[in-house]
Image (spheres, grey):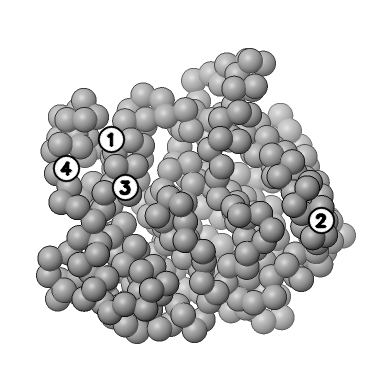
Amino acid sequence: MQDTAQSTPSLQRQMVDLATPLAPVEGYNLTALRDVRILRSDRPLSRAPVLYDPGIVIVLQGRKRGFLGDEVYLYDAQHYLAVSVPVPFSMETDASAEEPLLAIYLRLDFKVAAELMMKLDECGPVGDAIPRGLMSTPMDEGLAHAVLRFLKVMNSPLESVILGPDVVREIYFRVLTGEQGSSMRAALTRRGHFGKIAKAIRTIHACFDQKLDIGHLADEAGMSPTSFHAHFKAVTSTSPIQYLKTTRLHQARLIMVRSGVTAAVASAQVGYESPSQFSREFKRMFGRGPSEEASRMKHAFARPDPSPHGLYVAAH
């Protein structure tokens, strides 16, 4: 078993000092690497719905808590969060102006992950680990030092471009061989029922603006509607219909923030036929009406660049 990194004040201080200049503004700060952003938040943020791309979140200062069903996922300076399939959950943040939350978000590069998993499989099979869509894991010593090297590299414009991808690859390796790495590897290889549900999730994200027949998705997965519903909920902690609705609402928020369109236009673009129903469901999810929430997001946080997966990582 790998040793858990009980981050010394010196090691954590080094990480924070290196991350601070990389995150000059609140929200997601872009880096020289397309799939890596540095998050900063100067205030505590109350529990709110989010939807993450598959990826890794490494908190350097502050604390986040994710809530999915009855599970609570802590990620702080001692724990990181790994996401293997897009899962809508709620999250809250502990931060202050004196000690802002600082975190690294690495959107998963499936090609790099697949290459590493092939090499790892050559050294031994993954075994019978249960695939999981979301996991919070203690940071071991190997990962902690890889993160420190990564931050040092990212502070050099030349090194970030030339050496950055190699250090990111090492971080992937540390996660895939860490305490819950086998569960993530099993998820990314999409084994058994998890794989069938992962395929349905990909279809929902690719076609959320269309009329999706949940029964058809169940047929494609080779399951009865009842079995499909049960396995879908086991992976995402929500029903297929609710997952589709959540995806549409997150996408609509992104469209309004990024393109400045009205709620009516955004609702139509994500597949709603009734603007009034869209507004009701949007307010129920985000706690604010569409226009108010879009305005808040524009003024409070840096806008992310468009995701190739069509997903939005909320700036919380």
Q: Amino acid at mark 3?
A: Ala
Q: Is residue 298 visible?
A: yes
Please state the horizontal and vertical placement of residue 290, each as a whole percent of the image: 30, 78
* Identity of the residue furthest to the right in this view: 10
Q: Please indicate whether residue 145 sits to the left or right of residue 274 in the image.
A: right
Between the C-alphas of marks 3 and 4, the distance is 14 Å
Mark nearer the N terminus (1 vs 4): 4
Q: Which residue corresponds to mark 3?
A: 206
Q: Residue at x 73, y 67 (%)?
A: 22
Q: Residue at x 55, y 45 (%)?
A: 108
Q: Nearer the viewer, mark 1 or mark 4?
A: 4
- Circles 2 and 4: CB atoms closer than 8 Å: no
Q: Which residue corresponds to mark 1?
A: 231
- Circles 1 and 2: CB atoms closer than 8 Å: no
Please state the horizontal and vertical placement of residue 249, each as a whole percent of the image: 29, 64
Mark nearer the N terminus (2 vs 4): 2
Q: Please indicate whether residue 227 sits to the left or right of residue 303 in the image.
A: left
The kind of secondary structure element at disc 2 is helix
Q: Which residue corresponds to mark 4?
A: 214
Between the C-alphas of marks 2 and 3, the distance is 36 Å
Please state the horizontal and vertical placement of residue 185, each as a whole percent of the image: 53, 30
The kind of secondary structure element at disc 1 is helix
Which image quadrant is residue 112 in? top right
Q: Amino acid at mark 1?
A: His
Between the C-alphas of marks 1 and 2, the distance is 47 Å
Q: Residue at x 75, y 52 (%)?
A: 161
Mark nearer the N terminus (1 vs 2): 2
Using the image as rendered, state which of residue 9 and residue 59 is in the foreground.
Answer: 59
Q: Amino acid at mark 4?
A: Ile
Mark nearer the N terminus (3 vs 4): 3
Between the C-alphas of marks 1 and 4, the distance is 13 Å
Q: Nearer the viewer, mark 3 or mark 4?
A: 3
